[in-house]
Structures are given as C-alpha cells and as structure tokens.
Image (cartoon, grey):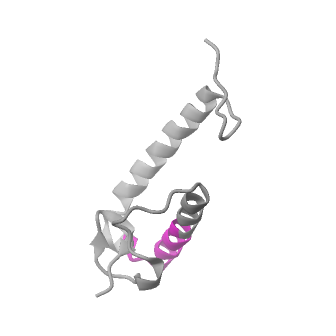
Amino acid sequence: MSAKTDSASGRCGTSADADATATSSVISTLRQQLRHQEVLEHPAVSSELRKLEEELTARLITAGRAPGRHRVPAATQKSGTVIDGTPWLVSVE
C-alpha cells in the first residue's frame, strides 16, 4: 500500500489520517471534560479556551473559511450561556 502525499500539508496520507484520528479523539475527550460546569468556569480553562478559539479563528480565516454563521463575534463574548454546545462560545447576557 502506498501513501498519498497531502498537497496542503506535504505529508503522507497515512500520517495525516493518523494525526486526524488522534486529534479527533483528543477533541472528543475535551468535550466530555467540559461538560462539567466547574471545569468550564475555571480561570485556567477559560483562558486556554479563549486562546484556542483565537487560534482556530485565525487559521480558518487564513484558510479562506470564516467561522460558521452560528458563531458569536469575539467582541460580544463573555462568560455566560453556552451556545450550540460549544463551550468556548458564549452569549452576552
């Protein structure tokens, strides 16, 4: 079996697939951990989630894909109600 090269990353397809599988698993675990409100509201967790959101937004925009229409602009976010099951995007109350 030969590995295909991913033109976007320059990596072999099997390596990219393995990375995607591992990343998907980590994200799934994170989502489960964030179901606990006390964890979600912890300052260290909130800070890291904001950093992750900023990085993802920058990468998606760089890739030519703006965040989906259900996303709340960063300027209007603060701690509060979780939107769309995504813990780092919250509505202003």
Residue 44: percent from the left, percent from the top? Answer: 51, 75
Q: Is residue 20 above or below residue 64?
A: above
Q: Identify the residue shown where x is 47% and y is 48%.
A: 26
Q: Identify the residue shown where x is 51% and y is 73%.
A: 50
Q: Is residue 51 magenta?
A: yes
Q: Identify the residue shown where x is 51% and y is 45%.
A: 23
Q: How many marks?
A: 0
Quadrant hosting residue 56: bottom right
Q: Is residue 23 above or below residue 87?
A: above
Q: Indicate the quadrant containing the N terminus: top left, top right, bottom left or bottom right.
A: top right
Q: Identify the residue shown where x is 47% and y is 78%.
A: 74
Q: Main secondary structure of the magenta part?
A: helix
Residue 13: percent from the left, percent from the top? Answer: 61, 28
Quadrant hosting residue 91: bottom left
Towards the viewer: 35 or 89: 89
Q: Which region of the structure is painted magenta?
A: 40-53
